[in-house]
Amino acid sequence: MKGKVVGIGGVFFESNSPDEIKDWYAENLGLSTNKYGALFQFKKHSDNSSAFLQWSAMKKPVDYFTPSTVPFMINYRVTNLEDLLQTLKKKGISQIGETEVFEYGKFAWILDPEGRKIELWEPVDSAFEGEFNKDSITE
């Protein structure tokens, strides 16, 4: 299989007060937050290039998780999203909505057998490079 999950791309969860939660995490755990939450940079073992993970608190209720009723969603970094979607379709796993393309990558969504929405992301990590310097890379 050419397309597959290669890591976590993000964690998204419902919050009654996302701004207060972001502030709490910044003040107490040192997260460097922005309007979307926090962006973590790391180095990929395969080639030592930069990669990124998004952490976001979203205002409850969150339509973005629909049709799931679970109050969170995990974004998985994938290789070759189109190939992975074709493979999943052959296994009877349907894509939710249409694939979306942005400067920072392609996105698609599926449901796991228990109804949790899963976001699949084929990233373009270079789109995030300007937000970091080499001292901000997590270990």
Image (cartoon, rainbow, N blue to C red):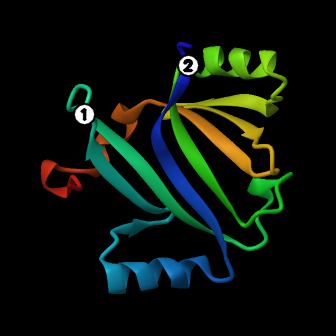
Q: Are marks 2 and 1 in contact (CB under 8 Å)?
A: no
Mark 2 or 1, nearer chain start: 2
Which residue does the image show at 63% across and 14% down from the upper left?
Answer: 83
Residue 26 in the image: x percent, y percent? Answer: 37, 79
Q: Vertical placement of 39 versus 32: above or below?
A: above
Q: Which secondary structure lies at badge 1?
A: loop
Which quadrant holds the C terminus?
A: bottom left
The one of 83 and 124 positioned closer to us in this rendering: 83
Q: Which residue is mark 1?
A: 45
The amino acid sitting under disc 2 is: Gly
Q: Quadrant of residue 33?
A: bottom left
x and y percent of residue 14 in the render? 67, 70
State the residue in front, 104 or 12: 12
Label 2 CA crowd tier, 10 Å (few <14, some 14–19, many 20+): some
Mark 1 nearby-residue class (10 Å; few <14, some 14–19, many ≥20) = few
Say if 129 sits above or below 27 in the image: above
2 in relation to 131, above or below: above
Residue 91: x percent and y percent? 79, 21
Q: Quadrant of residue 112?
A: top right
Residue at 79% across / 71% down in the picture? 61
Query: Is residue 61 toward the left or the right of residue 72 in the image?
Result: right
Alpha carbon distance from label 2 to label 1: 18 Å
Name the side, left or right, on which 109 lies relative to 27.
Answer: right
Count of marks, rendered view: 2
- Residue at image coords 81%, 51%: 114
Amino acid of disc 1? His
Is 85 left or right of 6, judged from the image as shown? right
User: Mark 2 falls on what kind of element?
Assistant: loop
Q: Which residue is mark 2?
A: 3
Quarter of the figure that contains the N terminus: top right
Residue in front for this viewpoint, 36 or 4: 4
